[in-house]
Image (cartoon, rainbow, N blue to C red):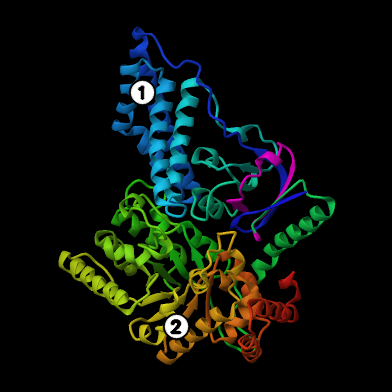
Amino acid sequence: MEIRRGIAVSPGVAIGPALVLDTEGVRIPHRTVELPQVPAEIDRLRQALSEAAVDARDTRERIATRLGQDVGNIFAAQQTAFEDNSFRVRIESLIHSKNYSAEYAVSRAIRDYVKRFDEAALKLGEHAGVEIRRRAAELIDLERQVLAILLGHTNEPLLSVTSPVIVVANDLMPSDTAGFTQRTVRAFATESGGPTSHTAILAGALEIPAVVGVGRFLTEVSGGDLVIVDGERGLVIIDPDDKTVDEYEEKRAHLLARADWYEIIRDKAAVTLDGASIRLLGNIELAQEAQHCVERGADGVGLYRTEFLYLNKITDPTEEEHYQAYCSVLETLGSNRPVVIRTLDLGADKFSHMAEQIGFEKNPFLGLRSVRLCLRKLDLFKTQLRSILRAACHGDVRILFPMISTVEELRQCKTLLNEVREDLDDAGIPFKSSIPLGTMIEVPSAAILADILAKEVDFFSIGTNDLVQYTLAADRNNENVAHLYNPADPAVLRLIQMVVEAGSQAKIEVNVCGEMSGEPLYVPLLLGLGLRQLSATPRKIPDIKRIIRQLSVPEAERVAEQALKLESARQVGNYLRDQLRRILPEAVD
């Protein structure tokens, strides 16, 4: 039995036979042709590119219908590439000048592009080069598709699948995942990839368990081998022993059984035993995930991560694309549920095509990211703010500014918002002028300045993922220091307490929207610190609600008071587990 750890990007547990996707290139039979054959090769190339573009368009429309426009847009970039005139001319020039076959010209042209991307990625460094490497990998996917058409090969391994499988691969490209459904694929695991990869986006949209960034493990797996994917803990277990299989079968059965009481608890209020009402909101990344919030009984959307409108695209989304995405969420939720739209949080590990414009940064997590990037790219920022104000006419919309580290940054954002209001008013475009404004508290400086920031906004939203990372100076995706990343660290708890107290004194709402708010372990603690609003992945909401309904506020306050007296994350974690076991034993299991 081999156990490998990666990045959990979609929760759930799956057990099944492995389907290893072949990542080897297509064999090209002839590199060159005779001069008289050149025109025929040009015709073959154009026909293949045209067919590939039609396939990409059809796939985009099919995926958009099934999973929403955001996911469908993954394939829009492919269609654009196949139809790009300069791309075609570059390949044709190789056929004309060197008598290359259509297949070899395609491969050489794309490999030249990939080489340039690889060189750029090396200059950018490990973190900043992630998006560049992803784009290089997707170019290889374009190559595979065109070569498959030219050589008459099929590229649909799932067509022969008769029962659900667990897909394992080095990485999954759009052409690989286009046919994935819950009926054919129980889960997937990849050696490469990160939380913002298109594979992760698709996993969330399909609600299929997934683990990415596992590192080299395919040499340990053969087709048909039994594999377990634990999307809760980020584990891939290869050839598990009988005891492990039994444990995971029980865990899987327990997770499936939750669906029954999800229906029972969905419409019940999130109220403590002594009558304190807690607002539970959902975190979403794609517009269609708003439906998941409704299905799980969320009171609204507490965090709409809008940067996914930018990823997997070669150009910025238009104002109309922003507007339609936001209106889609509002239509799904109805007018009585709030939607908190976080402005763009691009940069660091979430680079889009703008990575080349930003340039090399030695430490992108401390560089030009999030609101800093928006304040540099004002047209980009204004486009989004215009669309948010317009969409606000159709529901309860709130704006959340991320990564604020100084009061001046927040005031700059508010000034820019006022400019956008004036522009819309001058143009006679309908918009909602007065909507609640909030700021993320995700860097220590913002937590320390919370009493000052509270005077500038209508609400706070604590982003615990980055707050933990910046407070403890530990990248949770870096295996060398990941052990230091712990939301239960006393330093993190004190900062959260500081923010909650500042919000209480200013009489503004305080929300927690990081992963911490979705973990049952921390629910009693957060309520005890004074929080009355939590935002989490929709799947987590029924579990959180169940715990809330077993708690009283005085009990939660005792938990928080004791936790704040402890000196280490381990002590806090052990104490919280003991308390949760007492409140709701099955939640700990």
In the image, taking residue 256 as reference, residue 348 lies left or right, namely left
Which of disc 2 and disc 1 is earlier in sequence? 1
Q: Is residue 218 rendered magenta in the image?
A: yes
Q: Please identify the quarter of the rendering in which residue 551 is found.
A: bottom right
Q: Nearer the viewer, residue 52 or 188?
A: 188
Q: Position of residue 409 (x, y in %)?
A: 31, 74
Q: Is residue 450 rendered magenta in the image?
A: no
In this rendering, is residue 172 above or below 12? above
Q: Residue at x 31, y 28 (%)?
A: 90
Q: Position of residue 12 (x, y in %)?
A: 65, 57
Residue tagged 2: 509
Q: Amino acid at mark 2?
A: Glu
Q: Which mark is residue 339?
A: none
Q: Nearer the viewer, residue 465 or 327?
A: 465
State the extent of the magenta-drawn residues as a range: 209-233
Q: Nearer the viewer, residue 378 or 30?
A: 30
Q: Residue at x 40, y 67 (%)?
A: 342
Residue tagged 1: 46
Element on which disc 1 rests: helix
Q: CA distance from mark 1 to mark 2?
A: 58 Å
Badge 1 vs badge 2, beta-carbon distance below 8 Å: no
Q: Residue at x 44, y 83 (%)?
A: 509
